[in-house]
Image: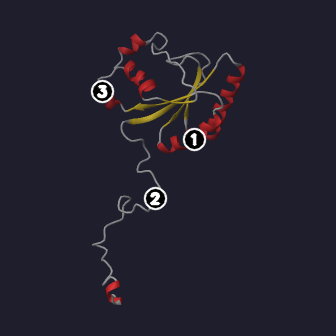
Amino acid sequence: MTSESESRPSEAPSAQSAPEPTPSTTPDVPQTSLPSPAFPYPIDHFDVHIYFKQYNKKDVEFARNLRDEIIATFPYLRHWPFHETPRGPHLTGMFEIDVVTPIEYGTFIPWLLTKRGDLSVLIHPHLKKEYLKGKNRLEIEIDDHTKYAAWIGEKLPLDLDFQGNAERMAQIV
């Protein structure tokens, strides 16, 4: 049996000797914030391409309404024009939304999962330029749209000749 004095610490540790708690030393304390407002290296931001069948009036209307709702709900996200004709590697109508922080990504993508209907979505990163040294524009675009891409919904074919511009793009470093 231990005495009362043996079961208690003899004195409180001094402020100088006690280590500061960190997430690694306090696993039972949840980390409640991201360490940085930016994506980790080498990611700069993400493109989110939302596709629709440009020859289908219902698809076009749904996509236009979805884009309007995105802009109203997330006015801080970068948005690009509504394209009813193929462009770049995209073989169907589409519009693009950019997310530039992990918080935007974590807020917008789950919302989009529930709102996209039957539309397909391609998500891909843009990597920082210094990470891409030695690659030409075509190599970068192909990797972005294939190697580093994720799909929500049906995976659609892409035109990796970029509407006949592949040769020109290969010259851009």
Identity of the amino acid at label 3? Lys
Choose the circle earlier in sequence order: 3 or 1: 1
- Residue drawn at the location 63% of the way across and 38% of the way down: 114
Q: Which residue is mark 2?
A: 30
| Amino acid type, residue under disc 2 in the picture | Pro
Compare residues 63 and 146 and report the one nearer the observer: 146
- 78 or 127: nearer the viewer: 127
The location of residue 85, given as percent across then percent down, is 59, 16
Mark closer to the chain start, 2 or 1: 2
| Residues at marks 3 and 1, CA–CA distance in whole angstroms | 33 Å
Q: Quick one: label 2, few (<14), some, or many (20+) residues within 10 Å?
A: few
Closer to us: 139 or 137? 139
What amino acid type is highlighted by mark number 1? Answer: Pro
Q: Residues within 10 Å of mark 1 (few under 14, many from 20)?
A: few
In the picture, the quarter occupied by the C terminus is top left
> What is the number of the mark on residue 110?
1
Q: Position of residue 112 (x, y in %)?
A: 60, 37
Residue identifier under label 3:
133
Label 2's element? Answer: loop
Distance from Cα at disc 2 to Cα at disc 1: 22 Å
Q: Position of residue 79 (x, y in %)?
A: 56, 31
Q: Residue at x 30, y 26 (%)?
A: 133
Horizontally, residue 112 falls left or right of residue 141, namely right
What's the residue at 37%, 33% (across, down)?
Answer: 128
Q: Residue furthest left?
A: 17
Does the residue at mark 2 contact the one at mark 1 (Cβ under 8 Å)? Answer: no
SS for callout 3: loop
Foreground tag (2 vs 3): 2
Q: Is residue 127 above or below residue 83?
A: below
Which one is in front in this view, the residue at disc 3 or the one at disc 1?
Answer: 1
Q: Residue at x 59, y 27 (%)?
A: 120
* Viewport quadrant of the N terminus: bottom left
